Image (cartoon, rainbow, N blue to C red):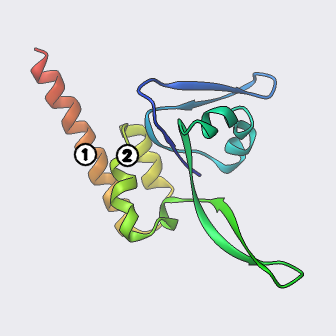
Amino acid sequence: MLVNYKNANMLVVEMGNGKQKLMLVPGINVIDDKIWDGAKATLDAKIKAGIVVPVYKVEIVKGKDGKETEVNKPCTPDDIPNDKLDGVVNEIQSEAQADKFVEASAKESVRAKGMNRKNAIAKELKDRESENK
């Protein structure tokens, strides 16, 4: 599951009785579907406010009555259409999330974009460090 967290600060969400926590960093986060299902109810207000934006793929499902219905399904990096992939990859803001993005993908082209983003983030951090010296 991909989630875009649109805030400058990290968010830690306790799930259930507090044993498990979900940490969201600014930008795209790659989250296990089971963990997302456990955190979704807790994040409902932030989702409605547009601070946490789940990235879904839309599938058309035929019901028993024959009517077609659009259903939101969890999205993996490989599910992102090519015309939207660059925009999603550019939303990744941490090297750790770039690594998760790459690990979650089986397509070489998607993995390459994730690795390029990771390298760009590393370069940005290195440039900031040299400016602060």
In the image, 43 versus 89, the foreground residue is 43
How far from the left and from the top, in percent, is residue 17? 81, 23
Say what secondary structure mark 1 lies in.
helix
- Crowding at dot 1, Cα within 10 Å, few <14 / some 14-19 / many 20+, comes out as some
Residue under label 1, please give it: 119
Query: Which amino acid, mark 2?
Result: Glu
Q: In this view, does 92 lie to the left or right of 72?
A: left
Residue situated furthest right in the rendering: 64
Query: Which amino acid, mark 1?
Result: Asn
Q: In this view, does 129 lie to the left or right of 91?
A: left
Residue under label 2, please give it: 91
Instruction: Mark 2 and mark 1 in contact? Answer it, CB < 8 Å.
Output: no
How far from the left and from the top, in percent, is residue 64? 89, 80
In which quadrant of the rendered view does residue 12 lie?
top right
Question: How far is the residue under mark 2 from the one under mark 1?
Answer: 14 Å
Say which label, 2 or 1, has the lower sequence index. 2
How far from the left and from the top, in percent, is residue 118? 31, 45
Q: Which residue is drawn at 67% across and 43% down?
A: 36
Compared to residue 84, the image places residue 93 above or below, namely above
Q: In this view, does 107 lie to the left or right of 16?
A: left
Q: Which residue is drawn at 75% across and 39% down?
A: 38
Compared to residue 117, the image places residue 38 above or below, namely above
In the image, 44 versus 109, the foreground residue is 44
Q: Residue at x 45, y 30 (%)?
A: 7
In the image, 53 versus 115, the foreground residue is 53
Q: Residue at x 70, y 40 (%)?
A: 40
In which quadrant of the rendered view does residue 122 lie?
top left
Residue situated furthest top in the rendering: 133
Say what secondary structure mark 2 lies in.
loop
Q: Quadrant of the C terminus?
A: top left
